[in-house]
Amino acid sequence: MRINPDLKDMAIALRREGHSYGEILKKLELKSKGTLSLWFKDLVLSEGTQKLLEKNNRLASERNLFEANRKRSERIKKENLASYYAGLEYVDSLSRRELALIGAALYWGEGAKSEKTPGGSVLAFSNSDPLMVIVYMKFLREVLCVNEERLSVGIHLYPTTDIDEAKSFWAQTTGLQKERFFIVNQISRASQGKRPFNTLPHGTLAIIASNRLHFFRVKGMIEGIGKLSK
């Protein structure tokens, strides 16, 4: 294919201005870098042009890296979202037995295990995650069938926490009356500056079920899970 000789002169002029191969191909609507390489093989560029080309190449590389990172971030977000919905669909429903195992596992991780607490053998669970608390309360109600009147609920708070707001939040989370909650511990003002103010905005909830048989039942469930996992 014959190429207009004027294109060569235009290409050389653009190259001397510091344009990259890709920019020249686009501007002149050429297809082959090989053609440019042939035209530029004896071309001597000034020091200023060489510096400009280096700068442009560096900027192009940074743009390409930015674009690659952007595409990678988008891909990761899509993959994460797909995995999230796959997990959501996997848990279609919970049987009573599954709820029992989940509740026992939650207590295993977040509950008191000692049989020699001051109040006797009680189920003492504490956590700051409202979703975990909702699941645990469902376990107490539907699996253990606890007498809710025997539940003690308290909130560990920081000095900066709004007590009334914290009580309202945990009352809505647990379905218990706001008046049932009491403040079980408040960190001293001396340590106030040692923790970020946005840590645990509603404090940590403590749920105590004063029932010796429930305690030993959950302890047995935990032991059963452990044995099945061996």
Image (cartoon, rainbow, N blue to C red):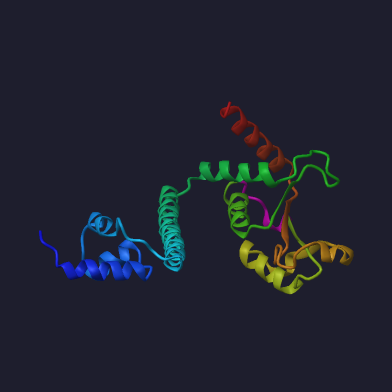
Q: Quadrant of residue 179?
A: bottom right
- Residue 212 position in % (x across, y down): 75, 42
- Residue 134 position in % (x across, y down): 60, 57
The structure residue drawn at horizontal position 52% and vertical position 43%, both measured from the top left corner, is 98
Q: Is residue 61 above or below residue 222?
A: below
Q: Nearer the viewer, residue 185 or 223?
A: 185
Q: Quadrant of residue 216?
A: top right
The verdict on residue 106 being magenta is no
Residue 97 located left or right of residue 22:
right
Give the quarter of the figure containing the C terminus: top right
- Magenta stretch bounds: 144-150
The verdict on residue 145 being magenta is yes
Residue 103 located left or right of residue 60:
right
The structure residue drawn at horizontal position 61% and vertical position 54%, both measured from the top left corner, is 132
Residue 142 located left or right of residue 53:
right
Q: Nearer the viewer, residue 180 or 98?
A: 98
